[in-house]
Amino acid sequence: MKRFIEFLEKFIMPFAGRVAEQRHLQAIRDGIILTLPLIIVGSLFLIIGFLPISGYADFMASTFGAEWLTKLLYPVGASFDIMAIIVSFGVAYRLAEKYSVDALGAGAISVAAFMLATPYKVSFTPEGASEALEVGGAIPVALMGSKGLFVAMILAILSTEIYRFIIQKNIVIKMPDGVPPAVSRSFIALIPAFAVFLVVWFIRIGLEATSFESIHNIINDLLATPLNALGSSLIGALIAVMLIQMLWSTGLHGAAIVGGVMGPIWLSLMDENRLIYQANPDAQLPNIITQQFFDLWIYVGGSGATLALVFIMLIWARSQQLKNISRLSIGPGIFNINEPVTFGMPIVMNPLLIIPFILAPIVLVLITYFAMSWGWVAKPNGVAVPWTTPIGFSGYLATGGKISGVVIQIVNFIVAGLIYYPFFRIWDKQKLKEEQG
């Protein structure tokens, strides 16, 4: 175990530190976080629309009219269906901040570049027709949502890099000192905006001459589809969890670092489930691995599934130090915040407790994945339940009111406790001996 700790310190920690400080990954992470309030609010309306109560739909239809559900879900579309636009602005804004250039201008140019790269065509089949027709001049809503996430992020980085390069080289139009700052900044952005438009326009024109036809198609075929296949697989989930736990073991925020890379994938998989669930709550959902899979079923109590450990300490700890830590940790732990126990026990850089800290989430991934894959437990329905929601409530809401979602959370809690218990006993005895000595 000593060699493992030395390996983490020598190789993993420096590399992970550099990744955590990488400005583009930080911008992507922060840009995605910008969408979370909207998605959570939209999810509240989705929950209200599909409450698992017998006769609820008939009651609502008789009270508010036959179109009550369509009108209730307006906010869902206004949040989920503009996800890519928000990410486009957010990623560019945060990246521009790191370069110390006008972030607002960078965000606006990024959104415009994203819209420029998107073909304004919508396919539909008229009533009675045998073939689908394409209508121009209509913004495709699907590409403004999760399907456009990767294009939005790539163009946000590209446009901001062009924008900051031109500004930092001072190739700008400067106005006299008496001009208001807001007007002056607008003129400064003229040449960078023109350059961004020119580059994206050439990219679009060039791709239209190929079989891909648009940047959305080429990114989906070459990047999004393979990454989604990896991110939605059991192997991908195990690798992600292992990396998160190893990073946390060295004191780095593993969820933030890995989430910066995998977050867009899990978010798009979540939205695939949401679209199918919204169309038909009884339909078979395609994805097990989503952001909710990790937040609500694997990390019960936070990274490492430490809520069970906190309860064990609260009940059985003999060491005064662990008793005090458990009292401090139980409140935050119920809401899946575990820094008090992670750094207070400590688990970080602790050769003994790192073992269950890494092992428990891996076992929970296997249990939860196969339980959902075999149909014993309902899959996450795409509702963005906040990760701070306590267990029981979160499992119920995220599966559309299925008790199985709660049961598997309780099972995972018990399994995590069984894994942690023998290691806790050893650590508690050691701490008690130190206090008595």
Image (cartoon, rainbow, N blue to C red):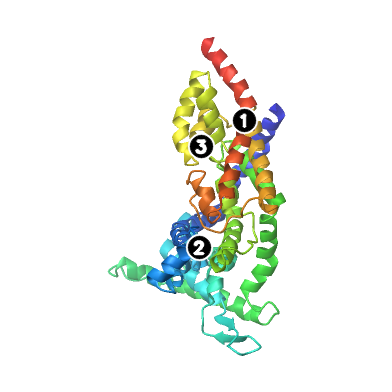
Q: Measured along the vertical axis of the image, is residue 51 above or below residue 6?
A: below
Q: Amino acid at mark 2?
A: Val
Mark in front: 3 vs 2: 3
According to the image, label 1 marks what residue?
A: 420
Q: How many marks?
A: 3
Badge 2 or badge 1: first in the primary sequence: 2
Q: Residues within 10 Å of mark 2 (few under 14, many from 20)?
A: many
Q: Nearer the viewer, residue 121 or 388?
A: 388
Q: Nearer the viewer, residue 434 or 97?
A: 434
Cα–Cα gap, marks 2 and 1: 39 Å
Q: Which residue is depicted at the point 67% across and 48% down?
A: 371
According to the image, label 3 marks what residue?
A: 338
Q: Amino acid at mark 3?
A: Asn
Q: Secondary structure at mark 2?
A: helix
Residue 251 appears in the picture as rendered: yes
Q: Secondary structure at mark 1?
A: helix
Q: Is residue 74 left or right of residue 436?
A: left
Cα–Cα gap, marks 3 and 2: 28 Å
Residue 262 locus on image (x, y percent): 61, 54
According to the image, label 2 marks what residue?
A: 87
Residue 357 locus on image (x, y percent): 62, 35
Q: Which residue is depicted at the point 59% across and 66% down?
A: 276
Q: Quadrant of residue 206?
A: bottom right
Residue 142 locus on image (x, y percent): 56, 72
